[in-house]
Image (cartoon, rainbow, N blue to C red):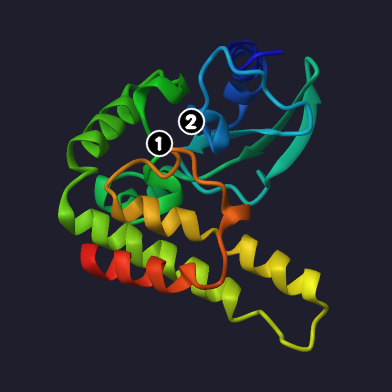
Amino acid sequence: MNVSQVKEAARQWVIEDGSKSPDFLSASLIGSITHLADNFDFPTSSDVDIAVVLAQPNPENKPTEFLYRDVLIEVNYPPWSDINSPEVVLGEYRRAGGFRPANILSDPSGELSSLFGALSNDFAKRRWVGRRCEDAMRNTLGFLKRVDESDLYHDQVTCWFSAEPAHATSSSRQRYRTQRPAVDPWRLGPSSTVTVIWTCTKAS
């Protein structure tokens, strides 16, 4: 199944089920699928992340994962207040890169489309590039602080790769976090920590 077919399955789930949630406002693809070409073969082991945006927070709507038309779907339910302005989103490197009109699955009110348009206008501004760099650096350094020299070597290596240093570097280049020449984190070594910190500091 290619990415285009997986996206269509996600859209159908929103129509049949996701849009029936109380206080439903809109739905959008998020995560890695938003950076893949439509003709790309989607990995069968990967899930598809969908954000179903609600008008009000609802504790009953917890993240859930299920199989739909042979597609593994993971749904989150952020309230509109979590993403209702560019300032809320633009400083978060994980969110900002995927919020584009092409990823919208359903938007009856048009509010999500307006928000995404505003995000694209300000995405490359230095202020927000710096904020996303700082956010990515906090994530990277937070993971690295968990490295315990007494752990087995492979556990230390796993912790290093979980730090996602390429995300901080790509944020500093004013691009969506996976819109960059291929960077294979498995080819990075501990010395790249210095590069990540220096690059993001220059952009801040």
Image coordinates of residue 161 in percent, x first then y, are 63, 61
Image coordinates of residue 166 in percent, x first then y, are 47, 54
Residue, disc 1: 179
Q: Residue at x 36, y 41 (%)?
A: 176
Image position of 184 (left or right of 81): right
Image position of 104 (left or right of 148): left
Assign a secondary structure to mark 2: helix
In this view of the protein, which residue sits in the foreground, 112 or 2?
2
User: What amino acid does circle 2 point to?
Assistant: His
Q: Image quarter for residue 49? A: top right
Q: Residues within 10 Å of mark 2 (few under 14, many from 20)?
A: some
Q: Residue at x 63, y 54 (%)?
A: 186
Asked whether the viewer can see residue 163, the reply is yes
Image position of 181 (left or right of 73): left
As measured in the structure, the alpha-carbon distance from the residue carrying label 1 to the one carrying label 2 is 7 Å
Q: Residue at x 71, y 13 (%)?
A: 1
Residue, disc 2: 35
Image coordinates of residue 22 in percent, x first then y, are 58, 32
User: What amino acid does circle 1 point to?
Assistant: Gln
Q: Of callouts 1 and 2, which one flags the residue occurring earlier in the amino acid sequence?
A: 2
In this view of the protein, which residue sits in the foreground, 200 or 45?
200
